[in-house]
Amino acid sequence: MEAARAANRRSRPRRPARYSALALLRYGLSGRDWPRTWPEQPQRGRYDVVIVGGGVHGLAAAYYLAVNHGITDVAVLDKGYIGGGGSGRSTAILRSNYLTPEGVRFYDRSMQLYRTLAADLDYNVMFSRRGHLTLAHNDSSLRTMRWRAEVNQLEGVNSEVIGPDEIKRLVPFLDTSAHPRYPILGALYHPPGGIIRHDAVVWGYARAAAAQGVAIHQDTEVTGIDVADGRVRGVRTNRGGIATPVVLNATAGWSTLVAAMTGVRLPIQTFPLQAAVTEPVRPFLHAVVVSGSLHVYVSQTDRGELVFGASVDPFAAYSTRGTLEFAEGLATHVIELMPGLSKMRLLRQWSGLCDMTPDFSPIMGRTEVDGFYVDVGWGTYGFKAGPVSGEAMAQCIATGRTPEIIEAFGLSRFGVGELVGEKGAAAVGHLYGGH
Ligand SMILES: Cc1cc2nc3c(=O)[nH]c(=O)nc-3n(C[C@H](O)[C@H](O)[C@H](O)COP(=O)(O)OP(=O)(O)OC[C@H]3O[C@@H](n4cnc5c(N)ncnc54)[C@H](O)[C@@H]3O)c2cc1C
């Protein structure tokens, strides 16, 4: 890959059109159309790297392969449209207040990358730092919050446990009295947490990667992966075959199906996760509020809508249909937290697929098939990990070595029983059986 890399560096394509006030004025006055965000390109018969999945993970990996390692002969294939999987359905909450040191370090690197992403990509990704509160309604969650705060602080991440008075000051509409069925005893407060515009992140990475020469092929489904003598030779798609020595599986909810094409088995089950949004109202909720016990979380967008999320549906499925049970349960729990919201109307609900692992941590890196890499197991928490995963997977593919920051997340950990237990820090409690 070294020769290809050197040639690519020499012939690195143009930078994308710069977005600026001046450019806006120029295009506005001249009446010219803006150039396409990324060009349509004919699909070629060979690429150095094929990335299956055009979500935040696949596109970030393509971007960092190009800008950090000069590897631009890369195709990102998506069976639908980019961002059409979990990435475009995410509630886009960012935080790094996890439970294990490995998790905290990993997600914190992502937060660092997110902070400068708008400038790096020249694309407004609307990162909004809000502060993130995980409520504790009983002694055992309070104990876990304290544990998380300790680990966070040791890793240099800003987190602390606060009491009901401080919570009330940050979120006046929360019912912090002793009356609710699940009174609020305290919270893990994580000031750097926030929200971002998920589509913008995906489009920004796609645009910046394409400007480096990465090919993005939508409506291109991988239907098979050719493996001979223990190594990857190419992929088959609904639009023809592609020869390649490297395939990255970044297909989240579909990842077990794609891995099975090479014979690699992943300890992952796919569950639907639903979310909902209300009509917009005047801004009143600055922080992101999560209640693990009530299986609900809420944030307010810059446009004023309240965005709600919950735990995954309690059965494994590939269905993305919304259910009435979800809307009813959500409303009950939200009103218990904030009784003042009882008159608000839900506008929409939707659902996406989540690739859940037994320890609520991802699976990243090489597999037993040479040239077949995985960046999967993102469950309900993978959007925030897009940048660091892309950076680490690009390094892994370019150097053939596993970067330290993802060493703990290898597939082999399940064989030797070295799990990275993050269940206590997954956004909300998950009720499904089996894990
Ligand atoms: C409702 C909801 C809310 C969430 N909220 C949050 C949150 O607040 N914070 C957070 O961090 N995470 C959240 N998540 C999780 C997060 O969205 C995902 O973990 C993350 O987006 C996964 O990104 P990805 O790029 O790995 O996969 P995806 O974005 O799912 O992309 C995978 C792509 O692979 C494509 N694909 C599948 N099979 C094939 C094939 N055979 N050939 C070609 N292409 C294929 C699909 O079309 C899809 O576009 C949420 C998820 C959901 C569903």
Image (cartoon, grey):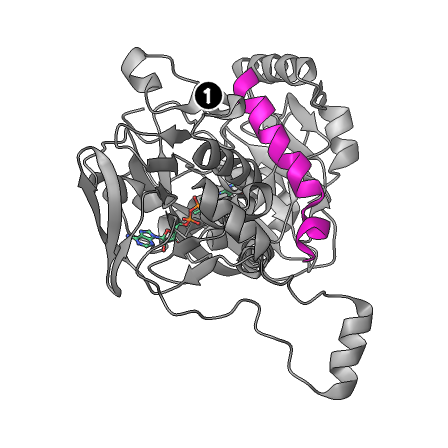
The residue at 77%/26% (across/down) is: 166
Q: Position of residue 74 (x, y in %)?
A: 43, 52
The span picked out in magenta is 101-123
Quadrant for the N terminus in the image: top left
Residue 254 seen in render: yes
Q: In the rendered image of this protein, does residue 95 appear above or below residue 118?
A: above
Residue 161 image position (x, y, % from top left): 69, 19
Q: Secondary structure at mark 1?
A: helix
Residue 109 on the magenta span: yes
Residue drawn at (60%, 37%) of the image: 337
Q: How many marks?
A: 1
Residue placed at 47% from the left, 36% from the top? 398
Q: Nearer the viewer, residue 299 or 197?
A: 197
Q: Is residue 202 above or below residue 335?
A: below
Using residue 37 as the reference point, say whether residue 162 is left or right of it.
right
Say which residue label 1 marks. Answer: 407
Q: Amino acid at mark 1?
A: Glu
In magenta segment, residue 160: no
Determine the main secondary structure of the stretch shown in magenta: helix
User: Relative to 322, is 426 above or below?
Assistant: above
Is residue 95 among the parts visible in the rendering? no
Q: 86 or 208, which is in the foreground?
A: 208
For residue 232, side relative to residue 307 (left or right): left
Q: Residue 29: which quarter of the image? A: bottom right
Q: Position of residue 243 (x, y in %)?
A: 28, 52
- Nearest the eye: 334 or 151: 151
Quadrant where the C terminus lies?
A: top left
9 vs 194, left or right, is: left
Q: Answer above or below: position of 88 versus 21.
A: above
